[in-house]
Image: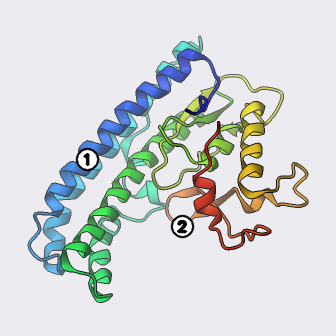
């Protein structure tokens, strides 16, 4: 049994977790609907693409709009439980759905990618059914990422325009949370900064109406993460001399969906044959 991932005001934590339950339901529903269309296609050749886009893109747009609308309601609830009387103004959907989520790349281009995965799989000798499943897995990742992007873009749009909100923090809410999100959750984000995500990320944005005296908002959690890294890899150094923590946690600017959490390649002494990304994602705080 692991210890709680966050230690914050019970009310704001509960709001975040309730919102995540809504998000999980939204993701599951959208994936189910899109998979029903996907598995009903005739031959997954280029002739299927137009009908696929005609049927799938309205569902994707509806999912993103639902995510954005729910985020506006969620942030208002967070401010209410914090005792802030600000009334937020939801952004126009055109700003936080569709192409703006991926740095201008249109959904018509994004949602053809499952077909390309099928074609690639077939060219590599995979069975037809396996190739179709590869495309379905890509589709699931795409829509789940877009739902999360609608959340983070809506949150930044609202937070950046609010006079009383000075910044934000991230709250990991999933049953299993990678160490990247845990480390990032200990930090304070400026109000003009988009919360970094990664595929499958289910962290929530929590507004801050007053900034603390330190950039680190949860020192105890950060200490436990460093301890876990030391236990897993055999070395840890707060001064970042024997191990460069920037090699473990990076924020890169993904070409489409902006700040992205990732792990850089790093050869750990005595364990160079291990994948840092795999090992980091397996960390559990006890």
- Residue 111 is left or right of residue 196, and the answer is left
Q: Position of residue 86 (x, y in %)?
A: 55, 17
Crowd band around label 1 with a 10 angstrom C-alpha radius: few (<14), some (14–19), many (20+): many
Q: Residue at x 11, y 68 (%)?
A: 41
The answer to whether one can see residue 154 in this image is yes
Query: In the figure, residue 259 lies in which quadrant?
Result: bottom right
Residue at image mark 1: 30
In terms of secondary structure, where does tag 2 sit? Answer: loop
Find residue 255 and name its label.
2
Label 1 vs label 2, nearer the camera: 1
The answer to whether one can see residue 88 in this image is no
Quadrant including the C terminus: top right
- Residue 80 is left or right of residue 60, and the answer is right
Q: Position of residue 186 (x, y in %)?
A: 70, 37
Count of number-bearing discs: 2
The answer to which of 178 and 95 lies nearer the viewer is 178
Query: In the figure, residue 8 lies in which quadrant?
Result: top right
């Amino acid at each position: 049994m692991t210890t709680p991932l966050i230690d914050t005001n019970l009310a704001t934590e509960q709001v975040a977790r309730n919102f995540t339950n809504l998000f999980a339901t939204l993701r599951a529903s959208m994936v189910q609907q899109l998979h029903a269309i996907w598995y009903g296609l005739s031959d997954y050749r280029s002739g299927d693409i137009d009908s696929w886009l005609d049927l799938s893109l309205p569902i994707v747009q509806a999912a993103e709009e639902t995510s954005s609308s729910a985020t506006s309601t969620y942030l208002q609830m967070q401010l209410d439980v914090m005792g802030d009387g600000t009334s937020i103004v939801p952004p126009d959907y055109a700003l936080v759905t569709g192409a703006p989520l991926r740095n201008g790349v249109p959904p018509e281009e994004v949602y053809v990618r499952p077909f390309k995965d099928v074609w690639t799989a077939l060219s590599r000798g995979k069975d037809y059914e396996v190739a179709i499943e590869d495309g379905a897995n890509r589709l699931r990742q795409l829509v789940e990422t877009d739902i999360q992007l609608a959340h983070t873009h809506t949150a930044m749009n609202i937070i950046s325009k609010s006079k009383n909100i000075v910044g934000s923090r991230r709250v990991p809410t999933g049953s299993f949370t990678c160490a990247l999100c845990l480390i990032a959750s200990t930090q304070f984000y400026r109000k003009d900064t988009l919360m970094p995500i990664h595929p499958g990320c289910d962290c929530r944005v929590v507004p801050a109406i007053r900034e603390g005296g330190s950039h680190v908002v949860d020192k105890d959690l950060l200490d436990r993460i460093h301890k876990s890294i030391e236990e897993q890899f055999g070395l840890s150094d707060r001064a970042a001399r024997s191990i460069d923590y920037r090699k473990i946690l990076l924020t890169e600017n993904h070409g489409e969906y902006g700040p992205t959490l990732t792990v850089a390649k790093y050869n750990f002494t005595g364990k160079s044959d291990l994948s840092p990304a795999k090992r980091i994602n397996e960390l559990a705080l006890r």
